[in-house]
């Protein structure tokens, strides 16, 4: 049985992973004057979603999600920026694999999984809400803009092309490198997709093409990979194991909010077996209990995990730093290339 991992420990480790990701990506915020009241510009090769926070008569209010396509700027706040500070959190949409790219800071405020408006966002009061760390924005003028960038310094059109290249690759096209350059492979793939989607007259980097590609990738993902669904009232931390060659690699922790489904593996499964472990925690970070039963979904196969986010390639004695043996459940896929793990409460 795995040790009881408290919610605060895992949450803190997630924050460390976010900081590491930002360092890896070289993500920066570049404020400058703009014509709109407050705009957010996406200069990355990913589709982003953003949430904002502001103080309204002494009450902190957060709202989201605003989807921003690569190379696009969007108006986030229509009112004049009369306050000294506003707050911003942004991340890649759930379309992308495993770890999300996040733009975050030091102010803990509440968000929700679907579109939301939360009044009193300093304290999460609903099971569907969770904390994220917002960046403090201090506008110098009544109109302001924040640009979200990555290590590769894309100009807006380059960001749009890199975003299209990434989506085309996820849709099954061979486009070569994701570099923001419209080479022959990219142009041929994009023209083929636009023709099949009936978008020959649309702008190549416009919303119509992006939205059609996003839909195509989502359809492709539903036909393969692993989905984990939380059908309980509690937050669930989950980990998985899968064969890669002669080894079993375990990965976690995946945070699954109540009523949410995530897809940690988007590529087709090998059709043989996977391993899973999950535990529900209450609002104090302790293992949740219902009718005297601890909500832990485990099995008999001892594999390695650790308290923080992990990917462990060597199983056995679990002697690495912070590692522990955890009882995973073995799932026979019976040849299936896709699978859904559903966590439910006992009746």
Image: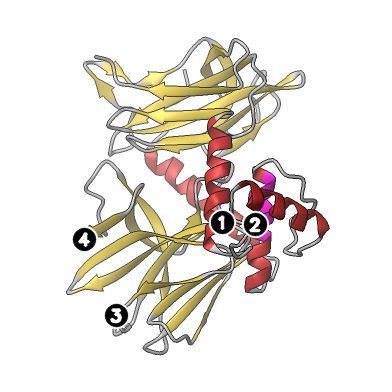
Q: Circles 2 and 3: CB distance less than 8 Å?
A: no
Q: Is residue 270 above or below residue 236?
A: above
Q: Would you call the spot at circle 2 few (<14 residues within 10 Å), some (14-19), or many (20 or more)?
A: many
Q: Would you call the spot at circle 4 few (<14 residues within 10 Å), some (14-19), or many (20 or more)?
A: some
**Label 1 or label 2, whichever comes before in sequence order:** 2
Q: Which residue is mark 1?
A: 210
**Label 4 or label 1, whichever comes before in sequence order:** 4
Q: Circles 4 and 3: CB distance less than 8 Å?
A: no
SS under mark 3: loop
Residue 346: x %, y % from top left: 28, 15
Q: Is residue 26 visible?
A: no
Q: Circles 1 and 2: CB distance less than 8 Å?
A: yes
Quadrant (top left, top right, bottom left, bottom right) of the C terminus:
top left
Q: Which residue is mark 3?
A: 79
Q: CA distance from mark 1 to mark 2?
A: 7 Å
Q: CA distance from mark 4 to mark 1?
A: 32 Å
Q: Which residue is mark 4?
A: 119
């Amino acid at each position: 049985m795995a040790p009881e991992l408290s919610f605060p420990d895992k949450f803190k480790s997630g924050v460390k992973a976010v900081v590491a990701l930002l360092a890896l990506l070289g993500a920066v915020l570049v404020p400058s004057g703009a014509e709109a009241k407050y705009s957010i510009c996406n200069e990355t090769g990913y589709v982003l979603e953003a949430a904002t926070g502001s103080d309204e008569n002494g009450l902190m209010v957060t709202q989201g999600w605003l989807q921003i396509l690569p190379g696009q700027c969007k108006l986030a706040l229509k009112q004049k920026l009369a306050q000294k500070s506003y707050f911003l959190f942004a991340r890649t949409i759930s379309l992308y694999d495993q770890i999300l790219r996040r733009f975050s800071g030091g102010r803990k405020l509440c968000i929700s999984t679907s579109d939301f408006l939360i009044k009193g966002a300093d304290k999460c009061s609903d099971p569907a809400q969770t904390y994220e760390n917002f960046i403090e924005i201090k506008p110098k003028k009544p109109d302001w803009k924040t640009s979200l960038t990555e290590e590769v310094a894309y100009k807006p059109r380059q960001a749009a092309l890199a975003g299209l290249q990434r989506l085309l690759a996820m849709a099954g096209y061979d486009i070569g490198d994701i570099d923001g350059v419209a080479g022959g492979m990219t142009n041929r793939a994009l023209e083929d997709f636009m023709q099949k989607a009936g978008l020959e007259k649309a702008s190549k980097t416009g919303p119509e093409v992006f939205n059609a590609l996003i839909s195509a990738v989502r359809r492709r993902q539903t036909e393969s990979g692993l989905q984990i669904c939380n059908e309980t009232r509690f937050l669930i931390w989950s980990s998985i194991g899968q064969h890669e060659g002669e080894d079993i690699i375990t990965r976690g922790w995946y945070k699954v909010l109540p009523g949410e489904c995530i897809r940690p593996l988007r590529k087709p499964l090998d059709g043989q077996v996977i391993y899973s472990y999950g535990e529900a925690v209450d609002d104090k970070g302790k293992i949740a209990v219902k009718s005297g039963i601890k909500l832990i979904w485990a099995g008999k196969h001892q594999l390695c995990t650790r308290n923080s986010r992990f990917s462990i390639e060597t199983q056995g004695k679990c002697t690495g730093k912070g590692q522990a043996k955890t009882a995973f459940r073995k799932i026979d896929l019976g040849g299936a290339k896709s699978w859904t793990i559903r966590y439910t409460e006992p009746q």
